[in-house]
Image: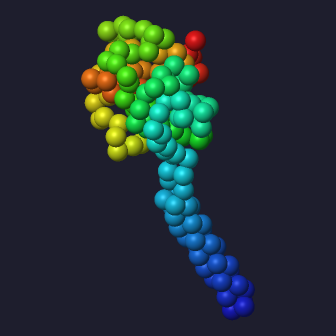
């Protein structure tokens, strides 16, 4: 009987240790892998950006400068910042209806304005929301918008 009790106690102890180890491993892996799908690039011009990253919108002018591009590798979320040659949006962008909402993607960056959603003034080809701050273009694409974009 003592041997059976010892086996049961050892089995339960092993099960508890394995369960705890699995929980710790899952928590650590989530912390270690968090952000691994978030990518960022910077390019001197729109032309170079589009040649290097084919996922950049084709409507970005070739002569745009200081291009910043953040995206997720797991879906269609994108963020774009560039200085345009003039204070006007590309011609493929159309005015956003005042009742439209412009949720921002989950992609993170230190340059994307926290209040961007409230500043969107246009929709550009591919479903991008956009606005200008002087000649600086801020544009973004949400995964859901990418699926429904014309």
Residue 129 location in percent, x, y?
Answer: 42, 21
Q: Position of residue 103 (x, y in %)?
A: 39, 26
How many labels, in total?
A: 0
71 sits to left or right of 89: right
**Closer to the camera, 1 or 140?**
140
Residue that appears at 38% across and 8% down: 95
Q: Quadrant of the N terminus?
A: bottom right
Give the left or right position of residue 25, taking residue 64 as reference: right
- Image color mode: rainbow
x, y (%) of residue 139?
41, 26
Say if residue 2 shows up in the picture. yes
> Depth check: 28 or 87 in front?
87
Residue at far bottom of view: 2
The residue that appears at 37% across and 22% down in the rendered structure is 85
Which of 20 and 8 lies nearest the eye of the viewer?
Answer: 20
Quadrant of the rendering where the C terminus is positioned: top right
| Residue 75 visible, this orientation | no
Could you tell me which residue is drawn at 41 percent across and 42 percent down?
Answer: 108
Residue 111 versus residue 84 in the image, above or below: below
Image point 46% across, 26% down: which residue?
Answer: 63
Q: Position of residue 96 (x, y in %)?
A: 38, 10
Tell me if 124 is positioned left or right of 87 in this view: right
């Amino acid at each position: 009987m003592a041997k059976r009790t010892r086996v049961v106690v050892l089995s339960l102890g092993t099960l508890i240790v394995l369960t705890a180890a699995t929980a710790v491993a899952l928590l650590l892996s989530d912390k270690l892998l968090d952000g691994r799908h978030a990518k960022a690039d910077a390019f001197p011009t729109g032309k170079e950006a589009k040649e290097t990253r084919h996922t950049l919108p084709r409507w970005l002018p070739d002569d745009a400068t200081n291009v910043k591009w953040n995206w997720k590798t797991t879906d269609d979320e994108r963020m774009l910042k560039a200085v345009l040659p003039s204070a006007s949006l590309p011609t493929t962008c159309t005015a956003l209806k005042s009742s439209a909402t412009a949720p921002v993607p989950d992609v993170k960056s230190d340059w994307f304005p926290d209040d961007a959603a409230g500043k969107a003034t246009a929709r550009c080809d591919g479903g991008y929301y956009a606005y200008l701050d002087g000649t600086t273009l801020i544009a973004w694409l949400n995964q859901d918008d990418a699926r429904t974009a014309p």
